[in-house]
Amino acid sequence: MQFADRLNNVETSAIRELFKLLGKPGIISFAGGFPDPAMFDVEGLKEASGNVLNEDAGPALQYGATEGYQPLRDQLSTFMATKRAVVAADELIVTTGSQQALDLIGKTMISPGDKVIVEGPTFLATIQCFRLYGAELISAPIDAHGVKTDELEKLIATHKPKFVYLIPTFGNPSGALLSLERRKKVLELAVKYNTLIVEDDPYGDLYFAEPPPPSLLALSETVPGSRDLLAHCGSLSKVLSPGLRIGWLIAQPELLAKATMCKQFSDAHTSTFAQATASQYLKCGRLPSTLTRVRQVYAERAAAMGAALKRELGDAIDFVQPQGGLFFWARLTGAGGKTKDAGEFAKKAIEKGVAFVPGAPFYAGNPDVATLRLSFATADVGKIEEGVGRLGKAL
């Protein structure tokens, strides 16, 4: 059987492949990027879905508009306003998770051979998605404060990319938080070089102490001309439930229209019942208290993991304590003659009953094999301390 040539550009997710090794009894996993199911507001979702069936069953169980269920679009407009972004309901479309929003951007914007700048490292599924459409990916270096804008400008000027893809707030896998100064600079670069910026923001509400700087979308009001050069992808997956598959895309009208057309070909519309349930949930006002609880739990787990890594691995590992999100991004230093190869370390860790994701697959080019990603989201403090202890023994 002869498959499409575009499949030659992508590989099976290294993370998904790793999950096949996690069936071993008693294993502690820091590998996934999932929220903790214990954080789901099950009672609130029961109430919301019940209200849908009692009050609006016909439309909620019927085919719907590709752009999205109108009451949800209205609620998302209100939700974005709480995050200092003024977005009219008709300036967004509802997608099947933010992953579909990224796929729609790939479909509408990328022709084979087009250059796209991404962070190094960046979200693995985005690398695969954009490569599927034939993009040549170029990595922009980052640090704990996000993409290095001086380097980014050089890359934009040299390569003239179709667009730049960033996760400014608690990135996956880096956990990096783009500073306010750099956020403004990114928007200025968009205008200076007439370059589209794609902002992926699934983690922005998962801060532990102080709220992060405003999103690029919110800040675009302060940089004339930048709003039309910005596409913003949002999601309820990390803050409410990934199973609902509710995301959204905010963009200028022409791009939004093309994305809507492509979505018609793909799934006709996101589940109307899921959209109606999300709409009812947002309407009832339970999300703020849910977020408060989630932030407290994840903050406690992140603190426990940071302390355990310092205690158990010492100077053999280097990391920046995350201020939000779901991940630690770390680098093996080789101190004391210990390994600097995260792939080899991962195999030894599995033997000790603990799993994480080596960092190399998160790079579009020139991977740093000493890096690794650890998620603290689904393990309680006791499991985190035990798991990191096993990492120490494996190293």
Image (spheres, rainbow, N blue to C red):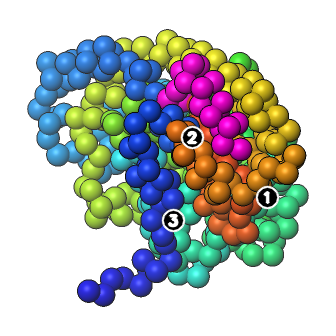
Residues at marks 3 and 1, CA–CA distance in whole angstroms: 19 Å
User: Left or right of 231: which side holds 308?
Assistant: right
Q: Position of residue 247 (x, y in %)?
A: 43, 42
Mark 3 or 2, nearer chain start: 3
- Characterize the local packing of mark 2: few (<14), some (14-19) or many (20 or more) Cα atoms within 10 angstroms: some
Query: Magenta residues, as a range?
Result: 377-395
Tell me which corner region of the image, top left, top right, bottom left or bottom right, holds residue 217: top right
Where disc 3 sits, the SS reads helix
Residue contact between numbered discs 1 and 2, judged by CB atoms under 8 Å: no
Which amino acid type is shown beneath numbered disc 2? Lys
Which label's residue is closer to the chain start, 1 or 2? 1
Q: Residue 352: which numbered mark, if any?
A: 2
Residue 199: x %, y % from top left? 61, 49
Whether 321 is among the magenta residues is: no
Secondary element at tag 2:
loop
The amino acid type of the residue labelled 1 equals Pro
Task: Kindly identify which residue carries mark 3.
Answer: 128
- Does the image show residue 339? yes
Name the residue at 51% across, 34% down: 28
